[in-house]
Image (cartoon, helix red, strand yellow):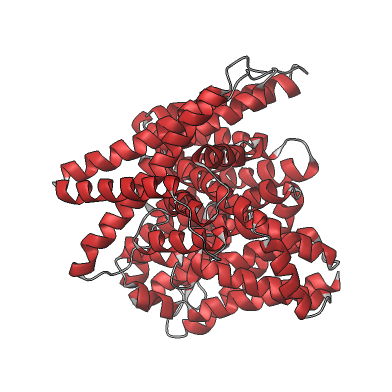
């Protein structure tokens, strides 16, 4: 509940700033700083809630009974080490840092006290869950393992040629395989890398993590998540489904095409592929199966369609990329809109070819289509607020996200949505925002260590072997991104590889915005590829479909998306 209250305060603050600036031609000093501080508080207050669920970004492997308990112990130990990093590092920073915020008049240590509180809450929540499950022995072993590893890492140094960044990658992979949340795996691995020459003490990890989250632009993430959740609660999402069905429901594979069309329309509201995957798997999977689609194929269509949400505006992936690389958000969103429509067309062709045995439904009459369109018009207002508001320069990205959230909340209020439902919308959005925000912060130490280890220079040297032509550099970058997408969530991959590869692309003469669009679309394909295909795992978890069969069923749609990326690359080389 507290996290939902913080999110409501953030929304009220930004909306007040918009009203004061555009209506009264004035403003409040410190609005951006207060918003950033509230966002940091939101992330760490809701961090314990984000330990489970799709956005926890756990890799749930099918362990044998014998291996399940050790994996759980390792995963819990990883989370406890991450909690210790946050708590210990924040305590040290709070005692060392001085001064007050010049705009807020608050002591600077307050931000880090909230961070430490988040670490303590993570540890307490994990312990209480294991106690309620009567797994006291497992908890005790995890606590002992986490304590021994942390103590050893803080006390000892190893004379080894292994670069610290490689050690972080290795230990993060171990944590991920054991099903620890990805953000926890990054934080714990940064500590475990200290004996290998890592430059980051716990206090440095915390300051780096908080710095990575301290961008006013990132407030748009919880607002866009709130927009999508409120749109569903208001019933407007159902009107989008009906309108999509009136457009394409009569075609071959009409229900599957409706899933794609709904994903394309709904992506203009949620900005989160995982959120749309959950929505579509819950809404469409039973219907597809009832109409004779094999469960794996139905799930594959849903997972592939969900890729579009992080491409078509508002896109959380583009927000993260803009924060990491200082590229223009407005230009990225316009490029994402064009790319998303091309990807949707590619998927439509693939669905048409793979659903030859599924005839369409009855063609909607012009009157029915008009009625469905009019019912969906309120949801289309989001596109005007987000894309045109940002692109024309009327409002900033964060302001547009806040206005979109207020707009959908108003739709929910007018549709007489229950107060308890609206409160759950705030809680859900705060939890999802915390998971993404913690990942952004946790990737900071890893990104810093990559820079210290000179990984950018290594990539530049590797690219130089292929020649310095734009085509060679672009092919190299796409290959790196495809490889990264196999193992990393898109948010982490953008934070780690965006700043490394963008300079290579611009030095080769490639358009930075076009390259940014290619980066996001290429990494989104990783949501469909093993072993960490997040969209496949989410759909499989909701629909109870084995991941292996679902991965196989995505192959035709994966090929369609790769073809779309090839088109983007060809276009980029021509401009």
Compared across the picture, whether 48 is left or right of 341 comes to left
Vertical placement of 16 versus 232: above or below? above
Q: Quadrant of the C terminus?
A: bottom right
Residue 284 visible? The answer is no
Residue 347 in picture, x, y percent from top left: 57, 73
Q: Residue at x 57, y 67 (%)?
A: 484
Vertical placement of 542 versus 190: above or below? below
Compared across the picture, whether 171 is left or right of 385 comes to left
Residue 359 in picture, x, y percent from top left: 44, 80
Q: Quadrant of the N terminus?
A: top left
Residue extending furthest left?
Answer: 134
Q: Residue at x 79, y 77 (%)?
A: 471
Q: Residue at x 22, y 71 (%)?
A: 64
Compared across the picture, whether 507 is left or right of 520 comes to right
Residue 213 visible? The answer is yes
Vertical placement of 48 versus 333: above or below? above
Q: Quadrant of residue 464?
A: bottom right
Of 431 and 205, the residue lying toward us: 205
Residue 502 in picture, x, y percent from top left: 74, 60
Residue extending furthest front?
Answer: 159
Of 485 and 287, the residue lying toward us: 485
């Amino acid at each position: 509940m507290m996290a939902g209250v913080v999110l409501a305060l953030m929304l009220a603050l930004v909306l007040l700033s918009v009203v004061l600036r555009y209506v009264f031609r004035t403003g409040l000093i410190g609005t951006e700083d207060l918003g950033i501080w509230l966002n940091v508080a939101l992330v760490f207050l809701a961090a314990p809630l984000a330990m489970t669920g799709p956005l926890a970004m756990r890799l749930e492997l099918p362990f044998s009974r014998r291996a399940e308990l050790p994996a759980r112990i390792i995963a819990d130990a990883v989370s406890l080490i991450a909690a210790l990093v946050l708590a210990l590092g924040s305590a040290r920073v709070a005692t060392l840092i001085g001064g007050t915020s010049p705009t807020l008049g608050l002591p600077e240590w307050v931000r880090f006290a909230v961070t430490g509180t988040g670490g303590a809450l993570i540890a307490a929540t994990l312990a209480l869950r294991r106690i309620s499950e009567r797994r006291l022995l497992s908890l005790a072993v995890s606590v002992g393992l986490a304590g021994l590893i942390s103590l050893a890492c803080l006390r000892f140094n190893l004379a080894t040629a292994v670069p610290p960044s490689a050690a972080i990658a290795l230990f993060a992979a171990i944590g991920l395989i054991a099903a620890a949340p990805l953000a926890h795996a990054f934080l714990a691995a940064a500590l475990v890398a200290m004996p290998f020459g890592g430059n980051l003490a716990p206090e440095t990890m915390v300051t780096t993590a908080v710095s990575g989250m301290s961008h006013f632009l990132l407030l748009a993430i919880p607002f866009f998540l709130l927009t999508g959740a409120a749109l569903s609660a208001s019933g407007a999402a159902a009107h989008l489904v009906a309108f999509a069905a009136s457009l394409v429901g009569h075609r071959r594979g009409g229900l599957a095409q409706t899933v794609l069309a709904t994903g394309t329309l709904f992506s203009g509201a949620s900005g989160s592929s995982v959120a749309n995957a959950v929505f579509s798997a819950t809404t469409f999977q039973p219907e597809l199966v009832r109409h004779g689609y094999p469960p794996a194929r139905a799930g594959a269509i849903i997972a592939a369609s969900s890729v579009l949400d992080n491409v078509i505006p508002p896109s959380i992936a583009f927000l993260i990329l803009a924060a990491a690389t200082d590229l223009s958000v407005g230009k990225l969103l316009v490029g994402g809109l064009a790319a998303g429509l091309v990807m949707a067309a590619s998927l439509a062709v693939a669905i048409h070819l793979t659903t030859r045995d599924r005839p369409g439904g009855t063609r909607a009459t012009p009157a029915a289509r008009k009625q469905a369109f009019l019912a969906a018009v309120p949801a289309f207002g989001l596109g005007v607020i987000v894309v045109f508001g940002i692109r024309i320069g009327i409002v900033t990205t964060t302001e547009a996200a806040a206005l979109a959230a207020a707009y959908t909340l108003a739709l929910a209020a007018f549709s007489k949505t229950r107060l308890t439902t609206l409160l759950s919308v705030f809680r859900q959005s705060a939890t999802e925002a915390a998971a993404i925000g913690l990942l952004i912060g946790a990737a900071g130490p890893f990104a810093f260590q990559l820079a210290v280890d000179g990984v950018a220079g290594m990539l530049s040297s590797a690219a130089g072997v292929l020649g310095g032509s734009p085509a060679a550099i672009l092919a190299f970058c796409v290959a790196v991104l495809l490889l990264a997408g196999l193992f990393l969530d898109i948010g982490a991959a953008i934070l780690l590889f965006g700043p490394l590869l963008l300079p290579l692309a611009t030095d080769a003469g490639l358009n930075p915005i076009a390259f940014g669009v290619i980066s996001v679309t290429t990494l989104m394909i990783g949501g469909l590829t093993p072993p960490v295909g997040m969209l496949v795992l989410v759909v499989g978890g909701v629909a109870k479909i084995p991941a292996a069969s679902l991965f196989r069923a995505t192959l035709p749609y994966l090929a369609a998306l790769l073809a779309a990326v090839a088109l983007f690359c060809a276009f980029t080389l021509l401009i």
